[in-house]
Structures are given as C-alpha cells and as structure tokens.
Amino acid sequence: MAEDKELVHSFDKSSTEQVQVGLSTFKGKTYVDLRIYYKASDGEYRPTKKGITLSPDLLPELGEAIRKLIERVEKAS
C-alpha cells in the first residue's frame, strides 16, 4: 500500500516478530500504520497482513483507547 514509509517506533513482540509504528503515504495522503513484521530467513523484517492503517484524524481516539487499556491493566494487576 505505502508509497513511502517513515518508521516512528518499533518494539519486539517475540524473537521473530516486531511491532512497527509509522507514517505512510499513499496517493498523496498520510496514514498512521501499526503492523506486525516477521523476521525473514535473510534477517530482514517483512510486513504481515496483521495490522491497522488509520487516518491521522483518528489518533486522539486511538490514544484514548490506549489510555483506557493501560488503566484497566493497572487495575487488574
């Protein structure tokens, strides 16, 4: 999908998978992309179909959802 991608942050999900968060551009529009990448046999990370792409307009809603998840996890601990 992406014509251009800027990696903003990544973290390991496991020894062979990584979550990458970035900005991508498609047909002149910018999108937020959160995607799972797997480590290929050559050692490079490649994207999977597991992920979401959102309009930047939805970032406040995503942030609110993450804040609520953090609160719930902290209460459950």
Image: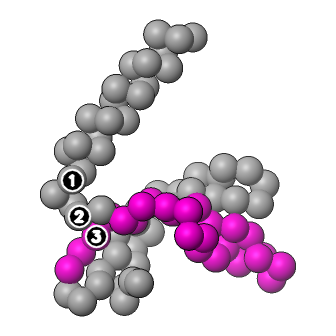
x, y percent for residue 4: 37, 85
- Look at the image and say whether residue 3 sits in the magenta stretch: no
The quarter holding residue 61 reads: top left
Residue 55 circle label: 2
**Residue type, numbered disc 3:** Tyr
Label 1's element?
helix
User: Residue at coordinates 34% horizontally, 76% vertically from top-left?
Assistant: 24
For label 1, count other residues whose C-alpha is less than 10 Å away and answer few (under 14), some (14-19) or many (20+).
few
Q: Where's the N terminus, which quadrant?
A: bottom left
Please state the extent of the stretch shown in magenta in the rendering: 29-53
Q: Are discs 1 and 2 less than 8 Å apart at CB?
A: yes
Q: Are discs 2 and 3 less than 8 Å apart at CB?
A: yes
Label 2's element?
loop
Distance between mark 3 and mark 1 Cα atoms: 10 Å
User: Residue at coordinates 29% horizontally, 84% vertically from top-left?
Assistant: 26
- From the viewer's perspective, tell me whether residue 62 is left or right of residue 49: left
**Residue type, numbered disc 1:** Leu
User: Residue at coordinates 24% horizontally, 75% vertically from top-left?
Assistant: 30
Q: Which residue is mark 3?
A: 31
